[in-house]
Image: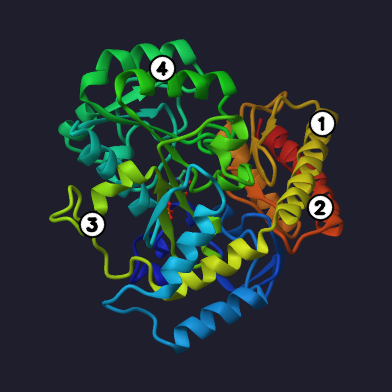
Amino acid sequence: MYARARAVLPGGNSRTAVYNSPYPIYAAAGQGCRVVDLDGTSRLDFLGNSTTLVHGHAHPEIVAAISEAAARGTCFGLPTEAEVLFAEALCARSDAYERARFTSSGTEAVMMAVQAARAHTGRPKIAKCAGSYHGAYDSVAVNNDGSGSLISHSHTAGMPQAVLDNTIIIPFNDPEGATEVLRAHAGELACALIDPVPWRSGLVPATAEYIAALRAVCDETGVLLVSDEVGSFRAGFHGAIDAIGGVADLTVLGKVIGGGMPIGAVVGKAEVMAVFDPSEGKPKLPHSGSYNANPVSMSAGVASLRLLTEAEWKRIGGLGEQLRDTMRKTIADNGLDWEVNGVESLFRVVTGTVPDSSVNSARLGHLLFQELLLNGVLIGDSGLGCVSTPMGQQEVDTYAEAFDAAVGAVVEQARAQG
Ligand SMILES: Cc1ncc(COP(=O)(O)O)c(C=O)c1O
């Protein structure tokens, strides 16, 4: 399949994140917490499409919601009741979510939030945290590689200098450092964009002190605080920033809220969301999209939120904690300096070194990913993983055994390579 794919797709697929050397494995089907590849090998899916599939694959209630919606028509040049129902379900999750607006991906939702902040404040620049990933939009594809560098740079070749000049970098989890940068640029900043649990910089949550300092400097300077919870929403039942003790002006959502269908949303203060309102004349921010709020995604989203009850959210969070503990034990038993981070149902293994070997951390991460595959488990090449609602104690125990075997094999290979 890879050979065929390469003839028509650069690198053999359409997402950098799912390319894997020497070649990606191609999925054939998924059911519950298992994914089957084209060779017929079934694995436990702890990646869940980069933490999207909180209810696993093909959950019967989500499939029914999708099928029923699709049978009535997949998209219209008219709004639908489905988008009202989904907005009501989302706004019920948090008092901070006063209004909602939908797109078809997290990337578009981040773009919409940044544009809304600009339209509301009339200011051109944005600030984002060093290292954090926020999708493919130019303005945020700056310092998104996990590193702590504060000099604006991009790994997107050909990025215009003007984009770099308009995206200011603040240090993560450094209240004084971030406050200083935000104050220095305040008059020209529309928003401070943060991910409260940024996976690419290690999946370490923001501290309450950091969030409080950002909230205070934003209030002082009129900069909007935007919380990108496309990945981290599941860190709290009412969202990630709420779990840490903060309130954002706008929150960006995606992934788990869509039940596996393409989705993005911006939720937040009615006063700010009014930039989209055309009912009193031309809005400050005209915003369209042929598939925005399509009823199939909306209906899958309603089902996904309905299934993610507080009890289920807590249960998978508990399984996540168990997983992190068992992985830390395996790492300690092997005398390694690796870290396991995360909160609730999210985890990330951050590889370090192996004694008596010079194999670097990224390569060790890749070896771990491969060894886990051979032991029947899929996580991300970056070490990112999550627990989904079809999982229980048995899957956690199977994962623990696979992780133990995989780490042993990685250490052996790393030593053999010297
Ligand atoms: C924090 C964050 N923001 C935005 C995005 C982009 O979302 P999407 O992949 O749906 O465009 C992602 C995707 O991984 C993300 O993790």
- Where is mark 3, residue-wise? 287
Mark 2 / mark 1, whichever is N-terminal: 1
- Where is mark 1, residue-wise? 334
Q: Residue at x 27, y 13 (%)?
A: 184
What's the residue type where badge 2 is placed?
Answer: Val
- CA gap between label 2 and label 1 equals 20 Å
Element marked by disc 3? loop
Q: Which mark is residue 396?
A: 2
Mark 3 / mark 4, whichever is N-terminal: 4
| Residue 403, position as x, y percentages in the image | 77, 46
Mark 3 / mark 1, whichever is N-terminal: 3
- CA gap between label 3 and label 1 equals 53 Å
| Residue 206, position as x, y percentages in the image | 56, 27
- CA gap between label 2 and label 4 equals 38 Å
Mark 4 / mark 1, whichever is N-terminal: 4
Q: Is mark 4 within 8 Å of ligand 1?
A: no
Q: Note whether residue 280 is visible.
A: yes
What's the residue type where badge 3 is placed?
Answer: His
Asked if the residues shown at circle 3 and circle 1 are in contact, with their CB atoms under 8 angstroms apart, the answer is no
